[in-house]
Image (cartoon, grey):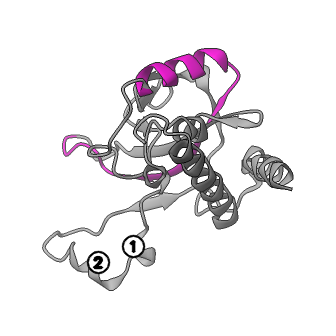
Amino acid sequence: MKRLTTYLTLFSLLTINSCIGQEAKKPVKISDFKFESIFGMSFKEPKNTYCLLGSGFFRTPRSNNSDSLISDWIKRHPDAIVVSVSSFGPTEIKDPESKMVYCWIIDGQDTLNNYLIRNGCFPGGTMIRPKTWDEMEKWEKELYEDIDEKPEVKVYVDKKTYDNFLDQIKSAEIFARENKLGIW
């Protein structure tokens, strides 16, 4: 039953084009990107920075082999696609058009994001996307009182697909913890 659930979840990820997010974005081939560690650059969108982690990426614990696992996975999956999950920005004051884009990299029934968590490279919580203004609790919004602009987070995948993905991430982290992999 668990295997069936996993396949159904992956199927929903693969049909991401039909998702009704705030703004659907078409997946892009991994060959249109250059990734170094968790960050990537799209040759078609050079102002944006893509990230394999949704939150906490500057302070998160990471395994010593995370960078090599990322580059090896990408080499083994040349037909993978990059799916934009959410974006926020600008990332540079000099360039208000630049965005940080949280992405999933998917090839068939495998995702790089899940692979990283399953191998203990990062805690599963790093796969949580940033919240939109409307999703924030009152206390979170109060953190922005002294700032002129509220954060602009755009979401590109629907809630059901995102929740299914998080269920996979939870299972992957449990596996990594039980097997004492990477950071565990």
Q: CA distance from mark 2 to mark 1?
A: 7 Å
Q: Secondary structure at mark 2?
A: helix
Residue at 57% across, 51% down: 174
Magenta residue check for 41: no
Q: Residues within 10 Å of mark 1 (few under 14, many from 20)?
A: some
Q: Where is residue 83 drawn, in percent x and y? A: 61, 41
Q: Residues within 10 Å of mark 2 (few under 14, many from 20)?
A: some
Viewer-side residue, 141 vs 63: 63
Q: Where is residue 89 drawn, in percent x and y? A: 33, 51
Q: Where is residue 26 drawn, in percent x and y? A: 66, 42
Label disc, if present, on residue 38 of the rendered structure: none
Viewer-side residue, 120 vs 85: 120
Find out whether the residues at labels 2 and 1 contact each other: C-beta distance under 8 Å: yes
Residue at 58% across, 55% down: 170
- Give, as a three-letter code, the residue at label 2: Lys
Q: Is residue 181 above or below residue 102?
A: above
Is residue 36 at least partly visible in the picture? no
Instruction: Name the residue that disc number 1 marks.
Output: 133
Q: What range is drawn magenta here?
A: 66-94
Viewer-side residue, 92 vs 157: 157
